[in-house]
Amino acid sequence: MGGILGIHSPQPIAAAGLVYLGLYALQHRGQESAGMAVADNGTIRIHKGMGMVANVFDDRHLAGLPGRIAIGHTRYGKSEATYPIGIHPLSAITKYGQIAIACNGNLLNPASLRRRLLQKGSVFQTATDSEVILNLIAKGEEANLEDAVAGVIPQLRGAYAAVLLSHGKLLAFRDPYGVRPLVLGKLGEAYVVASETAALDSIGAVYERECRPGELVIISDKGLESRQVVTLDRPAFCVFEYVYLARPDSNIGQQNVHLIRKEIGRVLAREAKVEADLVIPAPESANSAAMGYAEESGIPFDFGLMKNRYVGRTFIQPTQDLRRQGVSMKFNAVRAILSGKRVVLVEDSIVRGTTTSQAVQMIRNGGAKEVHLMIAAPPFTHPCHYGIDVPREGELIASGRTSDEVAALIGADTLHYISPAGLCRAVGRVMKELCLACFSGEYPAGLPESGDQAAMPPGEFEKEKERGR
Amino acid sequence: MGGILGIHSPQPIAAAGLVYLGLYALQHRGQESAGMAVADNGTIRIHKGMGMVANVFDDRHLAGLPGRIAIGHTRYGKSEATYPIGIHPLSAITKYGQIAIACNGNLLNPASLRRRLLQKGSVFQTATDSEVILNLIAKGEEANLEDAVAGVIPQLRGAYAAVLLSHGKLLAFRDPYGVRPLVLGKLGEAYVVASETAALDSIGAVYERECRPGELVIISDKGLESRQVVTLDRPAFCVFEYVYLARPDSNIGQQNVHLIRKEIGRVLAREAKVEADLVIPAPESANSAAMGYAEESGIPFDFGLMKNRYVGRTFIQPTQDLRRQGVSMKFNAVRAILSGKRVVLVEDSIVRGTTTSQAVQMIRNGGAKEVHLMIAAPPFTHPCHYGIDVPREGELIASGRTSDEVAALIGADTLHYISPAGLCRAVGRVMKELCLACFSGEYPAGLPESGDQAAMPPGEFEKEKERGR
Amino acid sequence: MGGILGIHSPQPIAAAGLVYLGLYALQHRGQESAGMAVADNGTIRIHKGMGMVANVFDDRHLAGLPGRIAIGHTRYGKSEATYPIGIHPLSAITKYGQIAIACNGNLLNPASLRRRLLQKGSVFQTATDSEVILNLIAKGEEANLEDAVAGVIPQLRGAYAAVLLSHGKLLAFRDPYGVRPLVLGKLGEAYVVASETAALDSIGAVYERECRPGELVIISDKGLESRQVVTLDRPAFCVFEYVYLARPDSNIGQQNVHLIRKEIGRVLAREAKVEADLVIPAPESANSAAMGYAEESGIPFDFGLMKNRYVGRTFIQPTQDLRRQGVSMKFNAVRAILSGKRVVLVEDSIVRGTTTSQAVQMIRNGGAKEVHLMIAAPPFTHPCHYGIDVPREGELIASGRTSDEVAALIGADTLHYISPAGLCRAVGRVMKELCLACFSGEYPAGLPESGDQAAMPPGEFEKEKERGR
Amino acid sequence: MGGILGIHSPQPIAAAGLVYLGLYALQHRGQESAGMAVADNGTIRIHKGMGMVANVFDDRHLAGLPGRIAIGHTRYGKSEATYPIGIHPLSAITKYGQIAIACNGNLLNPASLRRRLLQKGSVFQTATDSEVILNLIAKGEEANLEDAVAGVIPQLRGAYAAVLLSHGKLLAFRDPYGVRPLVLGKLGEAYVVASETAALDSIGAVYERECRPGELVIISDKGLESRQVVTLDRPAFCVFEYVYLARPDSNIGQQNVHLIRKEIGRVLAREAKVEADLVIPAPESANSAAMGYAEESGIPFDFGLMKNRYVGRTFIQPTQDLRRQGVSMKFNAVRAILSGKRVVLVEDSIVRGTTTSQAVQMIRNGGAKEVHLMIAAPPFTHPCHYGIDVPREGELIASGRTSDEVAALIGADTLHYISPAGLCRAVGRVMKELCLACFSGEYPAGLPESGDQAAMPPGEFEKEKERGR
């Protein structure tokens, strides 16, 4: 996952401070590391570090990063041991001058790109896709940076969004399928690009439009130039952004995510009826869907599981072990609400099932007579190769199991998923505009290349392999 | 504020790990420092530090604190500069052996107690009330620790709860008015005392009963002994625990706090009717009251202000300046929900008004036509001398202003408070069982002694004075 | 050991900065912790921490400690686990107002003093002697602080020196035997007290005189007042200060320590003649004695063992294990100098023998034909109860062994100690003015009380017991 | 400066631990950062960080670096702000597999090499010479790594020594003039390369020979292969290694450095006679030369300036300001030794003169009647372009001044330098085998290219420019 942000102002502006606020608004997309690069007067300065935005930056750092053009990045929690050298943005000098790049998502063909580059004499100091992109740009035959970047994008198979800074320009581009999100806004005269509209809001910028799949946006003092570098017949926006990833206060294509999730809950209520006394959300990502389910079903809504707000988001923690420990410190069942009730527990999605299983257990301990699980997503049966860090297929509880089997495993009385068709209807898009690979196994942008990990160094990169890329 | 916890098990048990989990559950009551003391085989070991529970303790620390009797403490965020020597628990040797103590709340007569003790040759190394209590105990003429503590409690004027550890015993006591909460639970054979029931839940302990005002509880391998050390004609439980302080999943006297807050919202809806299209909570402490208001009024409930969960609780941050900055990074108004609507904004209470004022402004920016503010507490007009860190009277926005004046200042169309009588009805208690001093100026346990700060050293303690004690 | 320092200026002066420089000059006396207290306008501020002076203080700390009266302390490396609460100076409010104290050396009767104080209601939060002294002062019946301190000194059996700060005064006192050093100097109008004259030099102060055994010095704006609180028939200055502890550039009673050590070497050369080609010092504390030995014997002096200056002083490191590991990283034998030579290795003293044994081995590896060990101190056979952290008797290599036996153990061809009489002659003092307990077992100030450790809490204090006090 | 080390063992061995010990022994050559890379089973692992060896590594790190082939590096203190990304070793994947490199010294043509590489599509993420070398290797047309490295060396103009690690091999090479040192040793079957012989000693390795100028050494399981890649008619070993840089216990070409420095002192005594009572060394780098001077002149040697061993080496501290402050905390003059004496102060070299000036002042304050300064090096008049961090010409006190003028500035009565010819005689080498550029302005390996800094990015690299490269 990860979040990216870029800002380019023709007038003097403290871009670093705005990127800081924007990164805060994107913190839910990645908490492992944070960084920014700011261009000022022929100099690009970088500050970055492991940890959350608030830990990486302080006033002094921001004051040391003057300039009106900047990019920022928050990295998604993969593994504790990740080597700091890979923290974004990466900065390098190339024949086109110094550039800095921040990228989220996943390339599908990094090894073959690396192999080709190595043959041409490139060196790789990190395991990042961004370094691959930097080297492709640096090998460009084009006259200028924009053309070089435009020449690179078609070579990048995968699901990604990137921001790139040169001394006078901000470039941003999105993969040809538009799997990962990227939006464009304005703050006065300044242009802003960001992973989500909430980041625009956080700095007072106004939403303009989505960056288009395969589009390269070049922002300079002369304004914005758009190049449609690759055009495909079908977009494939990640449906999981609707279901779980995006902030509820973000918009995706003019629609508010919270309202979309309520609609998902409503559709689910129509698809999966159950006799019950109470609808409760799994805290706290399923609030919206649960409200929608309650409204549509007429069953009262309440909070039966309370969250300790001093513990982080389960999904984003690195290890299964920590996840398990995290849960008991995170939830609390409210007996006064649950006791004697037939409870509908709405969950945004179910991956390994660990958290949900504990939630169901706590609800029963709280005195509930029945627990009916409603999942606001279809069965999660296939790994994501497009940038979401999910477990291998074998760890996905829905993989190879009927909903009754999953219910039994989880300890719920019944379990219902929303149908893929219902989900698409709720988000207001036709199926072929979306990436539903994690539910369907159909990967619109293709599968990762295989068998050529040889081009990756065993030391730095073994972590990646372990995660089953 | 602050949170305390104690555990005594007659069987071997890793008490430190349980205290750790319990402190996590009490983290909302204080984030400035955390600490615990564990008795083991004639040794009392302590680990404590500045910062939140997760930062102060790691596995290694817990492994180094074996033992089956333990106490813990989280301190409320007062001031960054607070000297680490005052972190709880305090440990000392006395004529009764080594003891450790953790205390929350406020003494009203610390200076006169100090003065008396200084004359008798005591030395004070910290500015804490706990050190005063330690010295009073150490000066006891009684034969044993329990009797000495029982002799000290009547001398302690104020609002407090404390846990105290000796080599074989856990003692806990509560001020004679019972202003600050303290509950008693069991985990198998072990006894647990804690500031809130949520801490019992977090370690799987079962609620037994409230500690009574003026009660001293002595837990040893022989079981629990209760002594009613002071008996008053009236309790004065802090009503603000219902309104704001306690976790929604805690119970106070068998009643769930979330449900009580919903009831507060319902009573408010009956008292203060308004024509509107939407009820939204101020995130996220007013969720319960807003739900109640919506249910009673029939006006639809939704989330119109979203919170960035990566920023801490406003009320608990130390400086006004940080508070101001915090808000913009914290909330986001959802235009799709607010646009064109007449909005009821429910807020748990209003202190300085800074946060609320910004919330109202954001709601208007989000397109709302009207903003009606409903406060789930009476006007907050008087300082708390009983352990809640609130501003001086002059900074309380409700002090000396009508609700219309406050509405105008805040930028709301109308503003309504729940009545004191309504609040009492909602929490199910008569007024004379509660402390409503912050709303009424009537301080059941009296005012702090004045004019004798001379007994406090200027260096260490000037911070305290600044805060207007 | 440890080092202390105090400064009192009648005019405005940045006392903290001077104490900082002075502590740097005393760093060799203790590296475990450092701290200072500064009185300013009715306030006493403290900053202290674990580690060396350079790590504990930075510019910001010093700027935050204004004032013209200050004391400082560096603590000797005892044990890693020592609890930070015991870092000096200690500060407390007493009936005489706020005071701060820093103390080095050892009380011999802390437990009986504690026991008495506990019976009178004192509490002890640390294991330090200073807290005992604080409590004795606080229990004083006298009218003012000076009289109270004067009343306490006769109760303190042991070897110690202390500085004490009140709002307007600096007090300093030294044990009645004068075991531990304390000197008095002037910097303009300001008075300075310090453990060694090198600390006076480091801030440009001029040596005035030694503080006398049993003397209490009271420095106020009115000048210096001296009270001879206790008068004994015999002083007992620690001879090990001459041999090892003091900096070579310090003076003891007008005599330079480096020159004294050269004289020790000369006397040793007269007492212990040997046929040899080369005299080398054990690096680097025996430089002076080795130079004296070479001058007197006529055998050429050179450096045959070189030190890696990036490793700390062996003697001061906490564990035997680290000591062993430390040596190989610390020394290097120079083959070009040693090869084929009959070498005299001069060592200041021999405690466990570990380091010396390795040095001898390295010299042989470097090609030396013979190694003759000359020890600039008599056999170290008895533990120090007066503040030097030495091993138990069983670990002292000289205990119960002839010099030939020690030579064999160490691997030297011969081994000679200076005689006690020779040592006294070299330092220019008669035996009965010195403490030679570590060599003779005669403890002028008596032995520590025994059997009453019961008054010390097992937790905090078990470390102390382990060290065989 | 900096220090490098490499080890290759055909048998299993904990190479990381040995590199750690070796880096400790090279710590005097650089204290800004430390790092190592270890090859194990097809994986190269790296650990590195800012600060001294002891701070960068702990047991855990070493345990996490298994393997029998390793390289290490300590970087010389240049500037506090140096960006961590440039810490050595650098590791990268190239067409020849993963390699790691550590390099000390200075390239003279980095910008033109960079420019050429940029045109061919290289990217540069750091300002290090090592990254240039990595890219040159990666662009090789040769069949294997050894041949590629051999092809790169002739392109590298400058003064350098490097170690390079691949999965099975350790490579080491030295610039064609042999300006920077590199020695070869054996530890059992294992080969060791290091900047100084003291590092060999520290791990028990035995000196074999110097690496030759322009030699590439390739060590694999098959043994050592040597290739004389470049052959020049004249070597140019840095004479400053003899004068100051090397440890006294190191050997340079079979001769011990301490003995060489004594000989320098002797030659100086013959060249510059003076009437005096005492010879003292500037602490502590001039001990050897001062001993030689004393022996030759017959004037007694003693220590008149004592060093506080808890402050680091002056020369190596980054800023002039810190240098100034450092001195007063570092030295102390011993009045008992100096008073009334005509003093010869021997100094290894004089750069800015700040330290020496203060030393002279302190000696006078200590009561000396006369101070005669003897410098064990010729006048330091030209900057070093070969890796020693010295000030610009304008800051060199000897630049454009006669020795009398310098004496006057410093405050000495007289000042004498050793002659270049005398220095060469003392070190036993003819002038044309040495680099004496800092004294003569004749740069055997040429001057740095000029005017093409354009290829370096302004941001990262401005620090370098500031230092006048």
Image (cartoon, coloured by chain):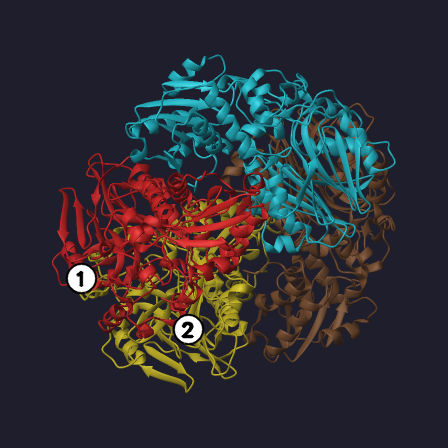
Chain colours: A brown, B yellow, C red, D cyan
Mark 1 belongs to which amino acid?
A: Pro
Say if labels 1 and 2 share a chain.
no
Give the residue pinned by disc 2.
B43
Q: Is residue A253 left or right of residue A121?
A: left
Residue C248 seen in the current view? yes
Dot 2: chain letter: B
Q: Which quadrant holds residue B171?
A: bottom left
Q: Which quadrant holds residue B380?
A: bottom left
Residue at (17, 52) in percent of width and height: C215
Mark 2 belongs to which amino acid?
A: Thr
Residue at (70, 36) in percent of width and height: D209
The number of discs equals 2
The percent coordinates of residue B305 (x first, y second) are 56, 52
- Dot 1 falls on a residue whose secondary structure is helix
- Dot 2 falls on a residue whose secondary structure is strand
Q: Is residue C134 left or right of residue B180?
A: left
Give the residue pinned by disc 1.
C154
The percent coordinates of residue C163 (x first, y second) are 25, 51
Q: Which quadrant holds residue D245?
A: top right
The percent coordinates of residue D397 (x first, y second) are 46, 18
Position of the C terminus of chain B by quadrant: bottom left
In the depicted structure, whether residue D28 falls above or below residue B373: above
